[in-house]
Amino acid sequence: MNFIFLITGILFVFGIGLLVSNNRKQIKYKRILIMLAIQIILVYFMMNTSIGLIVITEVGVFFEKLMKLADSGIQFVFGGMVNKGQFSFFLGVLMPLVFMSVLIGILNYIKVLPFIIKYVGLILSKITGMGKLESYFAVSTAALGQPEVFLTIIKQIPLLSPNRLYTICTSAMSAVSMAMVGSYMKMLEPKFVVTAVVLNIFSALIVANIINPYDLDENEDLIQIEKNERVPFFQMIGESVMDGFKIAIIVAAMLVGFISLMELINVMFLGVFHVSFQTVIGYIFAPIAFLMGIPWAEAVKAGGIMATKLVTNEFVAMLSFSDVAKHLSDKTIAIVSVYLVSFANFGTVGIVSGSIKSISEKQGSYVSKVALKLLLGATLASVISGTIMGIVM
């Protein structure tokens, strides 16, 4: 039965993708099937083998230890502000981003992260048949996140064709940065977060191959990674601290606005229609959730969470999901958890287009024009990842 829903979920993505495809005749079906096969193999390895389970468990334990280390600094500065037995989302989930940002800054500074990104990207390029730039960007986005990742190819962005620009922007919206992973693990099971990070790399490239297929000339695939001027070590530490703090503050502000807005809309819907807004959008997304493999009895609740992520952001959706997850099956929890781990939402479209526009006015204008298609592509990538997860549950 799981493989039937694998087919229905993938066919749904193909159907929608074909409707908006730029060039249906140029779709590389062999390339797509190879990436789907790799995803299935990976998810089986991670979830159904002893080695895979050990690896994924150890990754989760590693990030748990990092969160405890981050908590030592948080307690020193903010200790005593939260009543005993209570939990502060800002201190417990968002403030660890500061420490994670510092770690990523150090890994970048000592050239470990650029080395891993470059060569994993090259391997990915050989496997998927995608360009070296696209493969490099897919891996680097999963490590660095956006908008920072765009700075690594700042000289090439003004020269990219619309097709290649669409692909890298889809990757940027479909992945999540390593700095966020620890925070997500506070709200979702770590094994699902790790699995989603891996699956999303391929899912974004699959969707880009359907919606935005193209061929590359050999000369067009040259990759030049921007090397920033090396600053003193402690200056880098300070800048990384501020970068992480800015992210925490921005996410906190967005949560205050979005959650309050959702509550206002819910009150209005309950007053006028006697049904919550999340229930309404849950019914809209329920058929999609069902095609992904979620039981119909749980499809409306799951669909409401999926839609919440799209119209707000993943943090709002994860907080809502934690309230309803206790009433859902293990399979639904797994599928929805993987679906939620991405930046595919309306707010990210603005971040991506703004980042590109700050580098190139012309390219930024193009991204703004295809914003909805980018959001659709990134959302379909999340659907693929969630669907793939469902086959092992």
Image (cartoon, grey):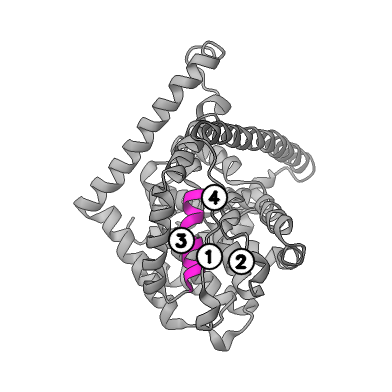
Which residue type does callout 2 highlight? Gln
Drawn side of residue 210 relative to residue 260, left or right: left
| Residue bearing the label numbered 2 | 156
Q: Which-is-in-front pick, marks 4 and 3?
A: 4
Q: Does label 1 or label 2 sit earlier along the sequence? A: 2
Drawn side of residue 279 relative to residue 92, left or right: right
State the residue in front, 179 or 264: 179
Residue 378 visible in image = yes
| Residue bearing the label numbered 1 | 224
- Give how far apart the Cα atoms at labels 1 and 2 are: 7 Å
Q: Are marks 1 and 3 in contact (CB under 8 Å)?
A: no
On screen, residue 71 above or below 271: above
| Residue bearing the label numbered 3 | 201
State the residue in front, 148 or 316: 148
Q: Does label 1 or label 3 sit earlier along the sequence? A: 3
- Give how far apart the Cα atoms at labels 2 and 4 are: 18 Å
The image position of residue 138, as x and y in percent, is 49, 61
Q: Does label 2 or label 4 sit earlier along the sequence? A: 4
- Give how far apart the Cα atoms at labels 4 and 3 are: 12 Å
Q: Residue at x 55, y 86 (%)?
A: 26
- Give how far apart the Cα atoms at labels 1 and 3 are: 21 Å
Q: Which-is-in-front pick, marks 2 and 4?
A: 2
State the residue in front, 52 or 113: 113
Q: Residue at x 38, y 61 (%)?
A: 120
Which residue type does callout 3 highlight? Ile
